Amino acid sequence: MITIKSAREIEVMRRANVIVAEILQRLKEKAAPGVTTLELDALAEELTYKKKAAPAFKGYQMAGRVYPRSLCVSVNEEIVHGIPSGRVLKNGDIVGIDFGVIYEGFYGDSAVTIGIGKISEDARRLVQVTEQALYRGIEHLRDGKRLGDLSAAIQQTAEGAGFSVVRAFVGHGIGKHLHEDPPVPNYGEPERGLRLKEGMVLAIEPMVNAGSWEVKMKEDGWTAVTGDGSLSAHFEHSVAITANGPYILSQL
């Protein structure tokens, strides 16, 4: 069921997402060669509690499994849901950092991909195009538009640059639950699908691979990696549809 949020609820979600955005900014500053992904997780958790929020991902359950950390940190060929560990970041890595909080009963959720030190030109272009695809999709979050308009814009941006969009994972509605209806694919056809309405809040999250769109899972049961070992990038914003157009809640 798709929930329509009131103006008051959207403002609460804005506060939740500002917390997410501020912590992501601190994590971007912290991430550097020699830092472990577990250190990033510890910083995120510490900052979350200081802001009187709770981590959204830690304890999340799926198919009988419980996610153990506050962050998802996905390095190079990892697409999403990388579990923080003792893995040390190296010069040239690209790192997807996905983070969410619960604040006053509502969820905030956002993700960025950053380069560690000096990255290759191919990696830089993949990151740039994936972020561009996110904003091309957001442009279509308007009352009366179709979900397919958004999905097609993301797909065309990524594939037009020679990359592929992941099919196995999609964006989602968000509000009092982390994952609400509707699912938001990063591929589709213009003028098809659900008609968008004012008051919907959607988490838009293109996942773009340098090679094939196919996905494999690591033995931990959470971490998704590219099927061909190519690089992957991921960006995400939580966005409300308002009378004035898209309102990016997770942007500072």
Image (spheres, helix red, strand yellow):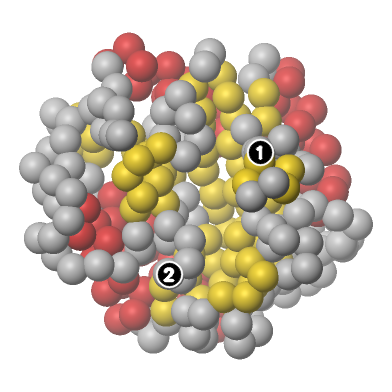
Q: Is residue 154 left or right of residue 60?
A: left
Location of residue 231 (image quadrant): bottom right
Q: What quarter of the picture does the N terminus occupy? A: top left
Q: Is residue 63 above or below residue 200?
A: below
Element assignment for label 1: loop
Q: Is residue 50 left or right of residue 210?
A: right
The type of residue carrying mark 2 is Arg
Depth order, front residue of 34/102: 102
Q: Residue at x 27, y 61 (%)?
A: 151
Q: Position of residue 141 (x, y in %)?
A: 22, 45
The type of residue carrying mark 1 is Tyr
* Residue hosting label 1: 60
Instruction: Decide if residue 75 is in sight here.
Output: yes
Q: Residue at x 64, y 50 (%)?
A: 63
Q: Residue at x 47, y 39 (%)?
A: 179
Element assignment for label 2: loop
Depth order, front residue of 240/148: 148
* Residue hosting label 2: 167
- How many marks on residues? 2
- Give me the C-alpha separation between circle 1 and circle 2: 22 Å
Q: Is residue 67 left or right of residue 245?
A: right
